[in-house]
Image (cartoon, rainbow, N blue to C red):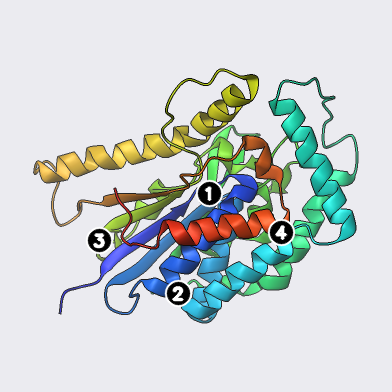
Amino acid sequence: MSESTNVAVACQGGGSHTAFTAGVLETLLQDCDWDEEYKLVGISGTSGGAFNALATWYGLVVGDVDTATELLESLWRDLSAKSYSDRFVNTWLTSLARLEASGMPVPQLSPYQFPGPETGKQRIRTVLESHIDFESIPGYCQADAPDLVVGTVDINAGVFETFVNEAVTVDAVLASAAVPTVFEAVEINDHLHWDGQFSQNPPVSDLMRQPPARKPDEIWVVQINAQELDGEPTSVEEVADRRNELSGNISLNQELRFIERVNDWVDGGKLPADEFTHTTVRRIQMDERFGSSTKFDRDPAFIQELMQLGRDSVAEFPPAQ
């Protein structure tokens, strides 16, 4: 019997668009043979991608693939704007984002100037803690468990910072999603942290820091921001959308290029085969484009649309390289 393929999954951030990733993960969990063909050795995420990575990891270590699938579904259902007041706020925020993207002058306010954003952050905290027992996470970080990696940026030190396994707290996850124009920074270990989309989006290199027997043979990247574009962006909104996509992909492409370089060294015999192996990178991309302003949209119907799009994107597996 052939050995299973070690797999690490990296979930890119992108606000509400990362509901797409939840649909992808649900399908991969249910359709892939995790008993014989594949072994999950790590999963990482940034911003909304961190929500998905956490839910998947936690569901697997406390239960099984069904537990993880159900947790992804229920988490996004609770993150959606369901109540009347939440729907009102959601409509207001997405409308402002659309106006700004279209070039309309919109008053700029710091999240430190009014209490609304922190109320929103508290709601996210409540949802996360209702599904995840964060105090129990260190007890599940066993040698045979996949690594869990959450990406942030330390705004005081000016460096990328990842939180791994037992260091993943609710504050770390909130910091990973703390968009500076929307939420106040999150203090962890006397340093302030912002959204991980400013750093590793998503963390990839941390997934490679495994003992030789657990190094990923394949990395599956769930990519929210479109890699390619046909034609030329000309309107203010098109330019804003493309800038958002390009900036969101910078760190990812840098990390993947380094993996490709190492692969070339491995294939050319320049690195010891007992320590370094070829790692195949597969991208699962959200091919349908939505305006960057809709990354704030938590309308339940839109969230379900994105999740179904994710499920459909991996109907035939493995995804194309």
Q: Look at the numbered disc 4 and give the secondary structure of its residue.
A: helix
Tell which residue pokes out farthest to the top in this image: 234
Q: Nearer the viewer, mark 1 or mark 4?
A: 4
For label 3, the residue is 212
Residue found at x 79% / y 34%: 96
Q: Please rate how many residues cluster around mark 2, counting C-alpha atoms within 10 Å: few if below 14, some from 14 to 19, many from 20.
A: few
Out of 135 and 42, give the one closest to the viewer.
42
For label 2, the residue is 142
Q: Please rate how many residues cluster around mark 4, counting C-alpha atoms within 10 Å: few if below 14, some from 14 to 19, many from 20.
A: some
Quarter of the rendering containing residue 103 = top right
Earlier sequence position, callout 1 versus callout 4: 1
Residue found at x 58% / y 25%: 238
Label 2 sits on what residue type? Gln
The tag on residue 225 is none
Residue found at x 64% / y 25%: 237
For label 4, the residue is 300
For label 1, the residue is 162
297 lies left or right of 86: left
Q: CA distance from mark 1 to mark 2?
A: 19 Å
62 lies left or right of 79: left
